[in-house]
Amino acid sequence: MTEAQKTIAPPAHQKRGRYRQQSLLDAAEALIVERGLEGFAMADVAKRAKAAHGSLYQFFASRTAILVTLHARHMERLKAAVAGASATLKARSAHPLPKVFLDAYLAPLQAFMEANPSYRILRLGMPEDWEGAGQEAALDSGVVTELTDMLAWLAPEAPAATRNLSAQLLLQLVDALFVLNGSDDLKAEAVRLLEMYLGDLTSRYAGGASGEIA
């Protein structure tokens, strides 16, 4: 077998490998939700996934490797959620009302949090200098850029710097709301306040609004 043949796995093998890795990550996520970050061992992950203990180490060398990979999966899914919100707004022919804007932005994030329950635990429980911190900073920067563009639907006449500040505010408040997992009443009140804020932003820069993003 040549070196190239050794490094390029057959498609079926790659598919099986991805499936096994995802099943191991799913098992780790369930354990994190049940027991916390320190409440499980590698053997527990293998047992929950119904996998051979030795096969676990083919994918992950340690618990830390599992956590880093799980967090990377979270990051990819969050990027997809934000991109989906942006695409929803860009598909509209006119700028939406603040409530419609927030619904388009918040609904994918709420769905993400429900589908990835360990994300909140990882965000709150991992040290600030761990590998995932850089991933989160990069994602936050990308989200601010997306939101700055999305806010052009609400206030196309607003200066880019103003929209950027508003995007940072939205990100910080929504991130805290979801990560800290506030009550339904608190979330509803926060959304109401955000609607008022976005309504004020729209009214301040309403002149000549066409709803088209430049």
Image (tube, rainbow, N blue to C red):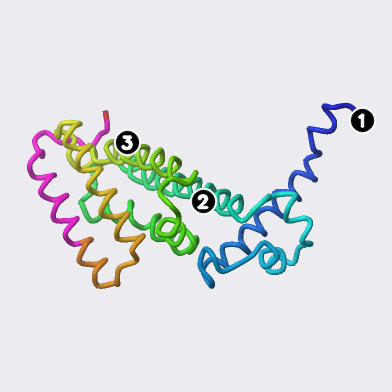
Q: CA distance from mark 3 to mark 2?
A: 22 Å
The one nearer the camera, 59 or 178, is 59
The one nearer the camera, 73 or 184, is 73
Q: Residue at x 20, y 43 (%)?
A: 166
Q: Which residue is mark 2?
A: 71
Contact (Cβ within 8 Å) of mark 3 with mark 2? no
Residue type at tag 2: His
Q: Residue at x 78, y 40 (%)?
A: 11
Residue 180 drawn at (x, y percent): 33, 63
The extreme right residue here reads 1
Whether residue 77 appears in magenta in the rendering, the answer is no
Residue type at tag 3: Thr
Q: Residue at x 72, y 55 (%)?
A: 20
Query: Mark 2 or mark 1, which is nearer the start of the sequence?
Result: 1
Q: Secondary structure at mark 2?
A: helix
In the image, the segment drawn in magenta is 192-213
Q: Which residue is mark 1?
A: 1
The one nearer the camera, 103 or 212, is 103
Q: Secondary structure at mark 3?
A: helix
- Is disc 3 surrounded by few (<14), some (14 to 19) or many (20+) residues within 10 Å? some
Horizontal side of 185 relative to 125 (left or right) equals left
Q: CA distance from mark 1 to mark 2?
A: 36 Å
Q: CA distance from mark 3 to mark 1?
A: 48 Å
Query: Dividing the picture into quarters, in which one does residue 157 lie?
Result: top left
Residue type at tag 1: Met
Disc number placed over residue 145 in the picture, else none? 3
Q: Quadrant of the image for the C terminus?
A: top left
Q: Secondary structure at mark 1?
A: loop
Q: Nearer the viewer, mark 3 or mark 2?
A: 2
Residue 183 drawn at (x, y percent): 29, 72
Whether residue 200 appears in magenta in the rendering, the answer is yes
Residue 53 drawn at (x, y percent): 76, 61
